[in-house]
Image: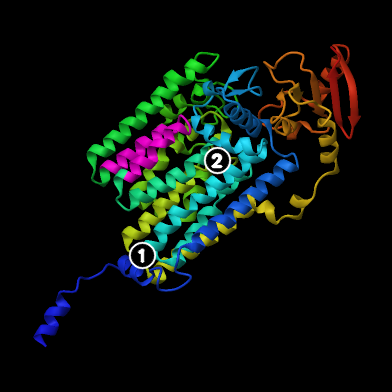
Amino acid sequence: MQAQSTESAAVPTQSPSRKRAAAESPHSGHFAGTWWIWAMAGTLFVMYAALSLRLHHRMITSSYDLGVFEQVVRSYAEGHLPVSEVKGPGFPALGDHFSPVLALVAPFYWVWQGAETLLVVQAALIAVSVVPLALWVRRTLGVQAAAVIGACYGLSWGVAGAVGYDFHEVAFAAPLLTLSLTALGNDRLVAAACWALPLLMVKEDLGFTVLAIGLVIARRGNRRLGLFAAAVGLAGAALALFVILPAFSPSGSFAYWSLVQDSPGAPGTAGSGAGGGLLDLLHRGTIGLVIPQTKVTTLLLVLAPTLFLALRSPLAWVAVPTLVWRFASNNGLHWGTGNHYSLVLMPVVFAAFVDALVRRGTSGPSLRRYLAGSAAITLAVLPAFPLFQLFRPDTWRTDPRVAVARRLMDSIPDGATVQASDHLVPQLTDRTSVGVYGAEGNRPNPQWIMVDTWVPDGARGWVGAPLSVEAEQQRLTAERGNGYDLVAVQDGYVLLRHHK
């Protein structure tokens, strides 16, 4: 009996998470393997790609941003620094945003030259970001939790908004963030820093996200590594904002500084009483981050899928730089839940959610309640965001005008200079030099002009549609006496060709 007691005492006690990991080893059951996590990512990839491609084929995508980014990728694929005709004749894209990571898309563009390539790459990047997160959850909280949290992240409203609105460079941030934060949550601090540093190549503001990750690494115990990563992040952001972008920009400065400056009387700025701009933020203090109410709604929706448990994890601090620049902006679109602006936040809050659950030792009924709550909130808000369009019959119907537009665009030869309506631009960026009709700073006297005159004023996009319906009609009439021949008028489309 004494020997038996001694032997029992020698057996180390396992934590609940270690017991779960041991019980759910790959040899304990077929479903307990990891193949289903990759299958889940594959399913999400198909959903993302299907929605993005369908919107593009229905001509719902726009010059800003799909047209701009395709011109950037096409430049890299042709072997020169990126330019965007949509931004202006020969406009250097590295003077707009610092995103050299887009050069990685060029090899895929060699295989298929078209905007579809960018949309498929984006779908793959976001879908694969689910895998590190789900693997971490499976190892620490179990298979059920991995399935629910992985699906909730993949279907989260921030992701749904991004895949339903063109292509954006921040898609590269999604897998880098889940890899970095997963490593950070497991105290693999060197790996966390290594996965975070490439964010500097994704977009200029993400250097501040690297700074935040470095500070969390320092807090986790590796002070030297954390401070080094933080310093590199800060230096990288400063180098991009104050050296690289001004060097390439035609204006000689970073064009988006105006977003954090007050413009009295402009919509969405402090001068209009709407609560925008850095000066207004400094004047109001922290209250400026939650005024107006749109900011509060966004902040609540960011945290709601985690039942606000993400706030109990230090990883949540990584979201602060993105939230600050968005809420300090005088552009009201940055405050809300639309477009792609919350994509970077979703990996952060879900990683913080997992970290908080693990730190609390959550298991059993308590864990199931958190999972059920997260799933309920995710599904409740999903119908308000673009991914839900996959389940709407209208998504799979094609307006007959699309075929008309394609037939008319086929008349435009490859390599031609073109000006076109906003939603026609990304249909032409793969084979022409195209800008937005009526935009300031366009290349003068393009060889071809194609305009959709049936787009009402309220549906002309928030960028790149500078002419009202009336002004557009007047300008098209004037083009006829300015060297242009009328090639076709059909179903609201007007196609003009310069006769020189």
- Give the farthest residue toward the front: 111
The C terminus - image quarter: top right
Q: Left or right of 8: which side holds 415?
A: right
Inspect the magenta stretch and tell me whether residue 289 lies in it: no
The label shown at residue 294 is 2
Residue 215 is a magenta residue = yes
Q: Residue at x 59, y 48 (%)?
A: 160
Scheme of colours in the image: rainbow
Q: Quadrant of the N terminus?
A: bottom left
Boundaries of the magenta span:
191-218
> Which amino acid, by three-letter code, is at mark 1?
Thr
Most foreground residue, 302 or 103: 103
Question: Does dot 2 land on a helix, a strand or a loop?
Answer: helix
Res. 373 in view:
no
Residue 216 position by quadrant: top left
Front residue of this view, candidates 442 and 309: 442
Vertical placement of residue 25 versus 164, above or below = below
Q: Relative to residue 131, is residue 222 depicted above or below?
A: above
- From the viewer's perspective, is 198 left or right of 74? left
Sort mark 1 into few (<14), some (14-19) or many (20+) by Cα contacts within 10 Å. Answer: some
Q: Position of residue 302 (x, y in %)?
A: 49, 48
Q: Secondary structure at mark 1?
A: loop
Q: Amino acid at mark 2?
A: Thr
Say whether residue 79 is left or right of residue 201.
right
Q: Which quadrant holds residue 114?
A: top right
- Residue most extreme to the left: 2
Q: Which residue is mark 1?
A: 362
Mark 1 or 2, closer to the camera:
1
